[in-house]
Image (spheres, rainbow, N blue to C red):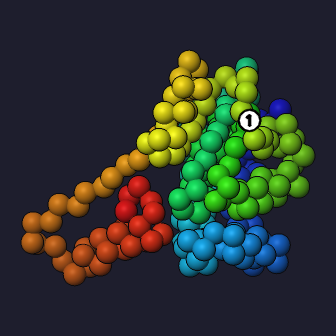
Amino acid sequence: MMELQERIQLISEIGKHLGSVDANWLTAKERASRENPWFIPEFIDHAVTQICQQFLQAAALAAWAKQYGLPAATPSPKTVGLVTAGNIPLVGFHDLLCIFISGHKALIKPSSKDSILLKYIVNKMSELDARVNDLIQFQEQLKNCDAYIATGGNNTSRYFSYYFGKYPHIIRKNRTSVAILDGTETAGELEALGKDIMLYFGMGCRN
């Protein structure tokens, strides 16, 4: 098993890699854009940049882990089944990050609309530390997990509830955001709102 500091160090190394111009990473992003036309290069780069800046800094990860009192070694790791959505690039990465940093094992069923990027990242993690192979795996059927995290639409959430409801779970449905304007907004605030609406072609729950 990997201890907490080792997991943090590995994730921070992944952050450096995702911010690089590594040829294999560039190829993976190009493939993801070809296979899902909604994932234009600008949106992939925006998602990756936000992930690197917000989630993958070693100091921030250490502070985050301290806030939740995560132990150096997880005494009895659980297996968490993760069903990811495919509406925006790497939308399921934060769930995977939470499972990994907390010292548990992840079994992932990625969305067919967004499998390339996540699989690339996990493969890169495995290259840097072979122990990841025992901690993160991809499977089409998620059976015998201790808990589940599943994200999808209102229809799929009913299936998630049927299959996963008897286990500890987080099931996310469709979400709608509302902006309330009172006429005092600045040009900068309206521009930011426009980006919130149009980013990822409006496919995100925040949109």
Provide residue 152's location: percent of width, then percent of height: 51, 45
> Considering only vertical position in the picture, is 147 above or below 10?
above
Instruction: Provide the residue designation for mark 1.
Output: 141
> Considering only vertical position in the picture, is 190 above or below 80?
below
**From the image, which quarter does the N terminus lie in?**
top right
**115 with respect to 153 (left or right):** right
* Number of marks: 1
> Considering only vertical position in the picture, is 92 above or below 185?
above
> Considering only vertical position in the picture, is 126 above or below 52?
above
The answer to whether residue 165 of the structure is visible from this angle is: yes
Q: Name the residue nearer the viewer: 169 or 51.
A: 169
**From the image, which quarter does the C terminus lie in?**
bottom left
Identified at 54% across, 62% down, the residue is 88
**137 with respect to 42 (left or right):** right
Q: SS for tag 1?
A: loop
Identified at 58% across, 56% down, the residue is 86
Identified at 71% across, 42% down, the residue is 108
Provide residue 181's location: percent of width, then percent of height: 15, 65
Provide residue 23's location: percent of width, then percent of height: 82, 78
Identified at 25% across, 57% down, the residue is 178
Provide residue 187's location: percent of width, then percent of height: 22, 81
